[in-house]
Image (spheres, rainbow, N blue to C red):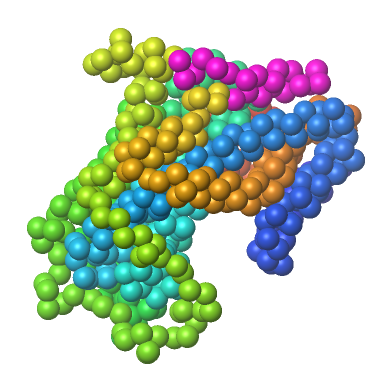
Amino acid sequence: MSIGMLTVLSLLPIIAVALFLVVLRWPASRAMPVCYLVAVALALFVWKVPCVRVAAASIKGLVIAGSLLYIIFGAILLLNTLQQSGGLKAIRKGFADITPDRRIQVIIIAWLFGALMEAVAGFGTPAAICVPLLVGLGFPPMAAVVSGMIIQSTPVSFGAAGTPILIGVNGGLISQEAVQTHVALIGHNWDSFLSLIGARVALLHAVAGVLIPLILVCFLTGFFGKNKSFREGLAVWKFAIFASLAMVIPYVIVAHTLGPEFPSLFGSLVGLAIVTTAARRGFLMPPKDQYWEFDKKENWDPEWSGKIEISIDEDNDKAMSLAKAWSPYLLVVLLLFVTRLKTLPFVDLVNPLAAGVKSWTVTFPNLFGTGITSKLQPLYLPGFIFILVSVITLFLHKIDWVSYKRAWWDSIKTALAASVALIFTVPMVQVFINSDGGAAGYDKMPIAMAEGVASLVGAAGLSFLLLSEGLELLSPEVTLSAT
């Protein structure tokens, strides 16, 4: 089969995702099972991969999907626990009291608080929290949604305590012999290798992230302001750049020193502390007579509001201090910190704790004799920490049992809703990655795709593709054969 035809076929799973999700706008729960079947059909009938290998790759995908659902459930449980306790209401009021200028509010809430929600929860949680919060402050719903989506950039690769790197990248690369060979050649162990990937990813995201808050406020004023003026957004460029640097500088430093669990966590926390303090003291803030506000609600475009009312927990009348409201998230950061760092001043105390949470490992070795292995560490995954902190918050915030049971039930329903898409999406990716070893003798689908690009644009284009996708980590022999 020609390289061009093989390239087109290897792209079919990706094309199917774009077709069903973007063009036809199917829900993921309906689209992803079809996309999984596309990948399986290609593996079985074109690449002629043995059925047992496809089954093994699918099971590995299910194990990874289970890990993701575990994290999603824990993150949403903690969020719902704070909703029931009144903690979210206190956090929202704290933001509202900083300034009435909508441009500053959107930077602090969407960019910094949204980055923190991405760091501790991920999986769409920033939109789920920040969008209603902004609507509750008086933002048009469409403006709130756009703001929540724009910030889904810099923090996402380290969302849910580094899940994309530690589970996504790790799950995709750890079984690849060429990658393992390369890691050995450069003298790294696997953990340090993942940290190296995280450090490079953080640098790329940070460069783009410097402009995200400014883009955010320009979109806000240019599309949702009374005067439709981008210039009104540019007027706070100093504060916007300051807010971006307050987040991305510690973000990059932490990525290079502490590992992929922490860049978004520490970057957002440090940024929030610096920027909210600066805003309260008037640093780089616009003059009071130049505070920016939306036009009157009756003048809004009807499309900005739609037909759905976003509910806010105003019926929760529990009063709570900001310190108490923030304490669960700070506790999450602390527990992640002490269970993952290898060197601390009190290392003798921390090492047993870190070793304890990592000791329980569930392994699925050499599935069906294919060499494909999967494992998970239930106590080490962030989901366990989220659930533990939720239980602690039950007593810390003195939540009644009826409310706490409601938090659990709502979280279970949310996790179940996400499960249908995940249990097909991740196995599809694993079948795509593990499509080598077939009777047809073709390279696995990602390599076939890279070879097709190389034939079109040459070695320079392939080098760019490999760098952008992280596939430069392949051994020199594989890279040479592809070029």
> Magenta part of the protein: which range?
356-376
Q: Pick the quarter of the image with the C terminus.
A: top right
**In this rendering, position of residue 358 left or right of residue 102:** right
Residue lying furthest top in this view? 348
Question: Where does the image place residue 156, in percent across and percent down from the top left?
Answer: 46, 47
Residue 284 vertical placement versus 434 (above, below): below
Q: Position of residue 355 (x, y in %)?
A: 44, 14
Q: Is residue 158 above or below residue 240?
A: above
The answer to whether residue 358 of the structure is visible from this angle is yes
Q: Which residue is painted at 29% across and 41% down in the image?
A: 327
| Percent position of residue 459, x then y | 61, 40
Q: Is residue 81 left or right of residue 430?
A: left
Q: Please name whichever residue, 408 or 182, is drawn nearer the observer in this view of the structure.
A: 408
The quadrant of the picture occupied by the N terminus is top right
Viewer-closest of 177 and 243: 243
**Residue occupying the point 31% across, 84% down:** 295
Most distant residue in the bottom direction: 299
Residue 54 is left or right of residue 365, and the answer is right
440 in the magenta segment:
no
Q: Residue at the spot x=43%, y=28% of the render?
A: 195
Give the quadrant of residue 89: bottom left
Question: Is residue 468 in view?
Answer: no
